[in-house]
Amino acid sequence: MLALSVKRGQRVRITTPSGEVIWVTLVKSGKGGSTIGFDAPRSVEILHEAVIANDNAAEVVTEEQGPRRAAEAVNS
């Protein structure tokens, strides 16, 4: 695992073997946790570990369902 220290607003670029570029941005950080943003092609699936670990997480949340729906899936 690569661990990097970043400040709010800084980005990290990930390039996949196929050449797709994914940007990860630290949006905010505080005592309760951090918020990170992903800028990636639609073909790249990004899931929170809590969604993967949840036995009831049979549905994948899409961008069309919006951020509120994505948050509901993570918090369920």
Image: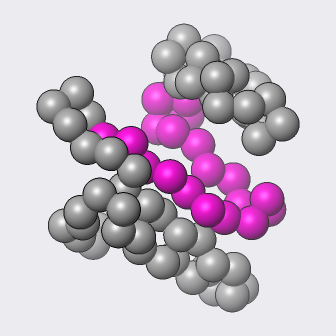
Residue occupying the point 26% across, 34% down: 33
Considering depth in this image, is 3 or 12 the residue closer to the camera?
A: 12
Instruction: Give above or below for 72 relative to 12.
Output: above
Residue occupying the point 69% across, 22% down: 69
In the rendered structure, the answer to whether residue 23 lies left or right of residue 5 reads: right
Instruction: Give above or below for 5 relative to 60.
Output: below
> Residue 29 lies in what quarter of the image?
top left
- Count how many numbered circles sit on residues in the image: 0
Instruction: Give above or below for 63 relative to 56.
Output: below
From which residue to which does the magenta span run?
34-53
- Coordinates of residue 2 in the picture (x, y in percent): 27, 72
- The answer to whether any part of residue 55 appears in the image is no
In the rendered structure, the answer to whether residue 53 lies left or right of residue 6 reads: right
In the image as oriented, which residue stretches furthest toward the right? 64
Instruction: Give above or below for 26 relative to 71.
Output: below
Considering depth in this image, is 6 or 18 the residue closer to the camera?
A: 6
In the rendered structure, the answer to whether residue 4 lies left or right of residue 42 reads: left
Residue occupying the point 79% across, 59% down: 42
- Coordinates of residue 45 in the picture (x, y in percent): 69, 53
Quick check: is 40 in the magenta stretch? yes
- Coordinates of residue 59 in the picture (x, y in percent): 76, 26
Residue occupying the point 58% across, 43% down: 47
